[in-house]
Amino acid sequence: AKSSYTGSVRTERPGAAAFVASPGVSGGFRGSDAQRAHVEAMRRSTAEAAPAAVASQDVAVRSDLGLNALKERKRKEEEEKHAKREAARAKRHTEATKQEVADEQALADCEAEAWQDSQTL
């Protein structure tokens, strides 16, 4: 068999699957005792926590208490946002109306002054 070598990959023939020579893992976990204890503790705590979380979700979904409370909170937030928008719109409208009145008053004063100036000439 013809062999070609490129880097750390050796192939027996062109188009064949490549393999890398590396030591195999045998015997499982090879860390320290502290690492092994930590991994086992994490597995136990995860296994203990998972059933409790699922059970609490089932209760909330079955009773619809959580869902209804969430919908009510969202509805109240939307009402508050709507009220704030309306208040801001009303404030802008009031300010615009005041500005229009002030502009009309200034125009009337200007016309009156212009009429008086034309009379004194």
Image: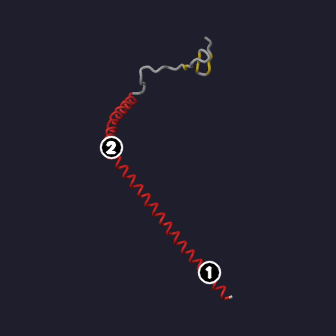
Name the amino acid, label 2. Answer: Ala
Q: How many neighbours does mark 1 have within 10 angstroms: few (below 14), some (14-19), or many (20 or more)?
A: few
Q: Secondary structure at mark 2?
A: helix
Name the residue: 43% across, 24% down. 30
Identify the residue at the far right of this view: 121
Q: Nearer the viewer, residue 85 or 43?
A: 85
Q: Tell whether 38 sits left or right of 95.
A: left
Q: Quadrant of the C terminus?
A: bottom right
State the CA–CA distance, disc 2 to disc 1: 72 Å
Front disc: 2 or 1: 1
Q: Residue furthest bottom?
A: 120
Residue 53 image-quadrant placement: top left
The numbered disc on residue 60 is 2
For label 2, the crowd category at 10 Å Cα-Cα, with few meaning under 14, some 14 to 19 and many 20 or more, is few
Q: Secondary structure at mark 1?
A: helix
The quarter of the displayed image where residue 48 is located: top left
Say whether residue 43 is left or right of residue 110. left
Tell me: residue 76, above or below residue 17: below
Q: Which disc, if any, is residue 47?
A: none
Q: Position of residue 31 (x, y in %)?
A: 42, 27
Q: How is the image coloured?
A: secondary structure
Coordinates of residue 92 in the picture (x, y in percent): 50, 66
Q: Would you place residue 4 above or below residue 120 in this image?
A: above
Q: What amino acid is labelled 1 in the image?
A: Glu
Relative vertical location of residue 30 with respect to residue 46 in this rendering, above or below:
above
* Foreground pick, 121 / 45: 121
Q: In the figure, residue 39 lies in which quadrant?
A: top left
Q: What quarter of the picture does the N terminus occupy?
A: top right
The image shows residue 49 at horizontal and vertical percentages of 34, 36
Please name the residue that numbered disc 1 is placed on.
111
Q: Horizontal and vertical percent for residue 100?
A: 55, 72
Q: Earlier in the sequence, mark 2 or mark 1?
A: 2
